[in-house]
Amino acid sequence: MCQELAMRDDYDHVAPRLTGTKEGTFAYLTVRDRWPKIVTGLVDQLARKRNELIDRYGNAVESDIQGIMGKFAQLRYEIMCDKPLKIFSENGFDGPKWRQLVTDMKTAAMPDDMELLTYFKGPWLFVECYLYRFIYSAFLCTEKLSDMDYFEDSKQKNFMDHLPQVEEAASFINKIIASDAPAHDMFAVGTMFRMSLWGNRADMSLTGGDDHTMEMTSVVASAKLNDFILIDDTYNLMMRVLGPLLKNERKRQDRRIDIVLDNAGVELTGDLILALFLLRRGFTDKVVLHGKAIPWFVSDVTEKDFRWTIDSLKETGPEGERLMEHLKNCVLEEKIVFEADWFWTSPHPYFVMEEEAPELYAELQTSSLVIFKGDLNYRKLVGDRDWDLNTSFEKACRGFSPCPYFALRTLKAETVAGLSEETIDKILEKFEEDNQWMTSGEYAVLQLGNA
């Protein structure tokens, strides 16, 4: 059994794992309010799409719909009543792994109290991943809807709601990668990474699946929201990682950068723009994008989202169409590649990747830089624990070190590490005991690790 799956380990007295047991915390409110809302939203969606699904699959799909609705009604009850997690019976692509994960966690809990592994009492990160795996299982067990992306409509609507913002970003990158564009690499790098960062504000999992349109475009945000970045290691990233890659003294042609994606919709367009920038400005020869193999956390990127988004850039206008052609050429030449390892939908923190997903870890060891996008990736980097704010990022990541990595995250959970004493003083002076700044998505970090 993986050490981190035990209900207790040596780090618990230093930085306890987040759970939903403490009233008023963001984890508690997530379990109490957001999770039931997400499940209810899926039931409502099935009800709205019933006739469409019958037209597509025939009357036989009715039993699938009723079966899913029944499971979701039970799930909502079990969340709200803090019932123990159940073990999956199906054999999906990761079904045996998840059965073992839940069994191991229950076994670890049983010596003291077999009821510890419940929706509120279990480790928040583990239980939240379990929730989305349960949703996937409900669809997987049907005859007609096993491959349905039940979050697809909301992800595509998020993109279509941001067409002007995407067109503006496309215009910006098209100028930056033009053959006659001025160098100014430090300025360009800072702008591109901040654009990718602030696109995370459109995260739909934070709203429980509700639409969320960004008022400020990512281009404008990259210039105006610097005061809300609590840690900015972009200069160190340029000096220690990107600068040497650009110089490329050994004339390598196999330089690789990885981006572990977060949300589809408008945020994914920012990540695609970042990938294109890194390629066209000579920092790398290949960008590997890591998404999810199944629908996940409402808005996370699947391969279908990746391909749909590139194809849909033409809807934004002439600049978006130019961007689409640039990206399609990169995909065709395998300079931009999409992958989806099972580990990204596991509940594991990343410091156990070498043990739990050795092939993925070995692959990342060939990379010059891994860029981790968003809140979930950050939570997995630091183990979803209540670290002291001044704990070093390196310590919180507990030895995870396949290569240099860079975390771009707007804060939406009550965990963060690596803040300076000056920043802590300013935050405490402004918010005192209120942790709203850690969960609102208003503040952000750009943190460099293992470099």
Image (spheres, helix red, strand yellow):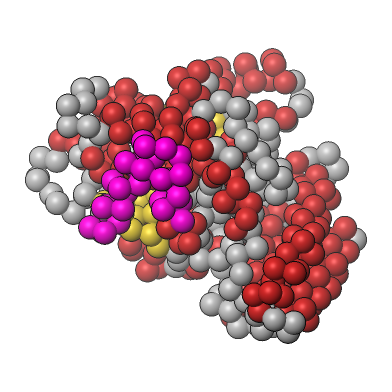
Indicate the position of residue 324 as horizontal and vertical percent values: 35, 47
**Residue closest to the eye, 231 or 105:** 231
Quadrant the C terminus occupies: top left
- In the rendered image, is residue 294 in sight? yes
Give whichever of 96, 201 is nearer the camera: 201
Task: Locate residue 421: give its quadrant.
Answer: top right
233 left or right, relative to 284: right
Q: Is residue 419 above or below residue 415?
A: above
Q: Position of residue 117 (x, y in %)?
A: 77, 65
Tell me what residue is drawn at x 77 percent, y 61 percent: 48
Q: Nearer the viewer, residue 52 or 445?
A: 52
Name the image quarter holding residue 134: bottom right
Query: Image height check: is 197 above or below 260?
Result: above
For image coordinates 64% across by 20% down, the residue present is 427
- In this rendering, position of residue 247 left or right of residue 276: left
Q: Which residue occupies 41% across, 45% down? A: 314
Can residue 200 be found in the magenta stretch? no
Q: Position of residue 198 (x, y in %)?
A: 52, 32
- On the image, the x and y values in percent for residue 393 come to 49, 38
Q: Quadrant of the N terminus?
A: bottom right
Residue at 31% in and 53% down: 328
Is the magenta region chiefly helix, strand or loop?
Answer: helix
Looking at this view, name the residue that lies furthest to the front.
55
Q: How many marks overall? A: 0
Q: Which residues are magenta?
A: 308-334
Q: Is residue 313 magenta?
A: yes
Occupied quadrant, residue 281: top left
Which of these two is toward me, 238 or 6?
Answer: 238
Left or right, 160 with respect to 31, comes to left
